[in-house]
């Protein structure tokens, strides 16, 4: 039986093993997206495939609750030295879009599997319709690149060259893919050795018992956090700017219910699965890790000593109706699921913020834009495809400090690539990279500033993909009197006669000399801005974080000749009336919800849910087209009636079913 001390010793060994795996991968990876941006994971798993240890220093932070059990079961006859893999979002529900290639390896002791090592790398490209394989405009999974269902990649230590040859034939930069995959195999081998060392130290039975105890301890810690919250139900909704090229918002809705040490996250009322790639392939798993990423951040914020493993998921149950954006059916496209997951985290943060308002921050930027360039290197005449840099926005203001600038909380694991490395490996020239003034939401504690980046290309028909472009219309929200943050933007040739604003468009074709500028959103503010000390505002102005105009407008701090005018500042602040309400969303959402009220959305989903799944997104789009001059539930019903008149093929629910609803 593990006592508290021995359990912590095992936890330290397990985390050290995971850190060693991460360092192995980080040092030997080939693509900039893995070795610099660090979009990868590694983990140790119990005999069933549930994660019991992850690194804290390197890699993505979304997957401590991931379980490989469904994928593991799809491969037969594991032997020592085998490594299995998949990148198919609809096979085993481990991978969630085609570029994420997941590998796992059994660890044998005395002929018995005692654990698994696993992880993923985000391949720069997996083929498909666009460079880097991902775009909002794609409409089915087959456009997003080659997919491999769970199968053995390495058999008793020997790579299957047929599989590697098939992959190499179908992707744009095979050397990067194969190099990163082999680096991940090396990391799994490192983890295997570390597990065998732990078995030697603790004994086989002791190690297996200890892993069970680690998962149980994390579960107990999560339940302790839930017990510290009041019982109740809190509802919240948030929007992705565009659900497809049709450019209607995508709404996610959550009802969070806490009862004692358990919580239910009911996403009923979220939009139907989309005719774009923003769908999240959860497979209906009530504890799928992608649904619970926001929960991990909440738990870790409230208890930084919590163990990060799959035990955290046990007190939570997610409800995701089949055929919804959070539980799509094949062959829905899913490549941009990370954009929807960012909004999913915002929804979770908003619900928990109401449950424990004194303990949680405002909204982070929620648009971790990943920029890839496909161009020709004039020095070598070779085609180059590479990740340039993530453009990650500010963190939400905390209860005790400002939000983090340029590295927004739930996407902070995406590291920037040094400009010198990018310009060496990719034929582009950076002309701007820094923080965007006035982009953080005003508050007693200011939201983190956005990142802005601009670069020039030199070759004809250079193609850029900037996935996860969002928050150009719906702002990251402020709380408790704090203001919503600044919006994101993407512009070709800013400040010239050839300027083009792209909004949320996530692909662009650039010609020699063109400059592309991308700005993220900021983080929301927290608390009344007029309660922020004047010296803090003055410091922000000196640092260039806040302009003197915004200081007066948003904070009531007046500057004359570069110094605070204390008398005028006091006059303005005396006249100020604090804002009421928990959230501040900004004028865009307030205007939108004047038409699309909660009751209007309730009616929309009542009519959509009565339709077959394959009709729902079409019907939603047609209803939105007919909402001009209409609002509320009556407007939605009138628009739906007009759609039915135009498309008599549209199935209508029976009168008995409508009456029941």
Image (cartoon, grey):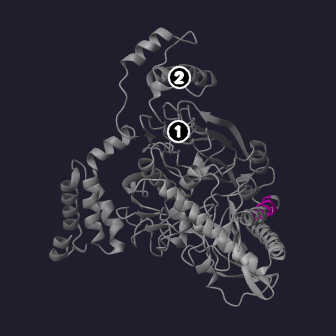
Q: In the rendered view, tell whether residue 496 sits above or below residue 5.
A: above
> Residue 88 location, x and y as percent?
59, 75
For the question of whether residue 633 can be seen, the reply is yes
Give, as a single range, the part of the protein colored magenta: 18-26
- The secondary structure type at the circle numbered 2 is loop
Give left or right: position of 33 versus 661: right
Report which quarter residue 492 is drawn in: top right
How far apart marks 2 and 1 lie (CA) works out to: 15 Å
554 drawn magenta: no
Q: Write down the residue under mark 1.
A: 399
Please give the name of the residue rendered at 53% of the width and 56% of the height, measured from the top-left corner. Answer: 225
Q: Nearer the viewer, residue 29 or 375?
A: 29
Whether residue 248 is visible, yes or no, is: no
Q: Which residue has dot 2 on it?
A: 533
**Is residue 245 rendered to the left or right of residue 416?**
left
- Tell me where residue 311 appears, x and y as whole percent: 59, 68
| Mark 1 closeness class: few <14, some 14–19, many ≥20 residues within 10 Å | some
Mark drawn on residue 389: none
- Front residue (pair 276, 291): 291
């Amino acid at each position: 039986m593990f006592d508290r001390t021995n359990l912590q010793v095992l936890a330290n060994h397990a985390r050290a093993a995971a850190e060693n795996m991460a360092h192995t991968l980080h040092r030997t990876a080939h693509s900039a997206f893995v070795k610099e941006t660090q979009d990868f994971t590694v983990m140790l798993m119990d005999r069933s495939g549930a994660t019991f240890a992850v690194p804290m220093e390197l890699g993505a932070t979304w997957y401590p609750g991931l379980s490989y059990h469904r994928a593991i079961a799809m491969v037969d006859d594991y032997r020592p030295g085998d490594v299995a893999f998949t990148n198919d979002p609809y096979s085993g529900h481990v991978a969630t879009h085609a570029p994420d290639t997941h590998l796992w390896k059994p660890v044998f002791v005395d002929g018995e599997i005692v654990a698994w090592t696993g992880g993923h790398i985000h391949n720069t490209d997996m083929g498909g319709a666009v460079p880097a394989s991902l775009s909002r405009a794609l409409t089915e999974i087959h456009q997003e690149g080659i997919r491999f269902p769970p199968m053995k990649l390495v058999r008793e230590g020997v790579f299957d060259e047929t599989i590697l040859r098939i992959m190499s034939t179908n992707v744009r930069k095979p050397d990067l893919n194969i190099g990163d995959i082999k680096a991940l195999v090396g990391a799994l081998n490192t983890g295997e050795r570390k597990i065998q060392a732990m078995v030697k130290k603790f004994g086989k039975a002791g190690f297996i018992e200890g892993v069970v105890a680690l998962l149980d301890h994390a579960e107990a810690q999560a339940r302790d956090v839930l017990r510290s919250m009041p019982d109740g139900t809190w509802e919240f909704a948030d929007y992705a700017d565009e659900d497809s090229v049709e450019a209607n918002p995508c709404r996610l809705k959550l009802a969070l219910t806490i009862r004692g040490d358990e919580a239910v996250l009911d996403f009923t009322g979220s939009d139907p699965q989309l005719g774009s790639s923003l769908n999240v392939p959860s497979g209906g798993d009530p504890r799928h890790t992608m649904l619970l990423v926001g929960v991990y951040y909440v738990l870790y914020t409230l208890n930084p000593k919590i163990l990060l493993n799959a035990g955290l998921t046990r007190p939570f149950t997610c409800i995701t109706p089949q055929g919804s954006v959070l539980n799509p059916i094949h062959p829905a496209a899913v490549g941009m699921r990370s954009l929807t997951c960012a909004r999913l985290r915002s929804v979770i943060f908003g619900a928990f913020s109401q449950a424990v308002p004194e303990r949680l921050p405002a909204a982070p930027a929620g648009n971790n834009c990943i920029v890839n360039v496909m161009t020709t290197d004039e020095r070598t005449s070779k085609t180059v495809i590479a990740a340039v840099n993530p453009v990650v926005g500010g963190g939400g203001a905390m209860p005790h400090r400002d939000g983090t600038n340029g590295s927004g909380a739930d996407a902070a694991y995406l590291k920037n690539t040094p400009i010198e490395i990018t310009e060496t490996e990719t034929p582009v020239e950076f002309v701007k990279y820094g923080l965007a003034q006035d982009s953080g939401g005003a508050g007693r504690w200011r939201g983190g500033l956005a990142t802005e980046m601009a670069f020039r290309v030199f070759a004809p028909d250079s193609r850029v993909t900037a996935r996860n472009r969002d928050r150009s219309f719906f702002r990251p929200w402020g709380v408790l009197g704090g203001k919503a943050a600044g919006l994101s933007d993407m512009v070709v040739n800013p400040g010239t006669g050839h300027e083009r604003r792209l909004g949320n468009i996530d692909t662009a074709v650039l010609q020699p000399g063109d400059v592309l500028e991308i700005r993220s959103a900021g983080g929301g503010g927290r608390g009344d801005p007029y309660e922020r000390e004047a010296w803090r505002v003055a410091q922000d102005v000196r640092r260039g974080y806040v302009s003197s105009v915004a200081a007066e407008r948003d904070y009531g701090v007046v500057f004359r000749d570069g110094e605070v005018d204390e008398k005028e500042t006091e006059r303005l602040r005396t006249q100020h009336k604090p804002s009421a309400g928990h959230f501040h969303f900004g004028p865009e959402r307030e205007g939108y919800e004047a038409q699309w009220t909660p009751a209007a959305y309730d009616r929309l989903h009542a009519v959509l849910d009565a339709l077959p799944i394959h009709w729902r997104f079409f019907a939603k789009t047609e209803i939105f087209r007919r909402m001009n001059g209409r609002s509320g539930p009556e407007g939605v019903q009138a628009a739906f009636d007009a759609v039915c008149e135009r498309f008599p093929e549209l199935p209508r629910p029976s009168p008995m079913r409508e009456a029941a609803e």
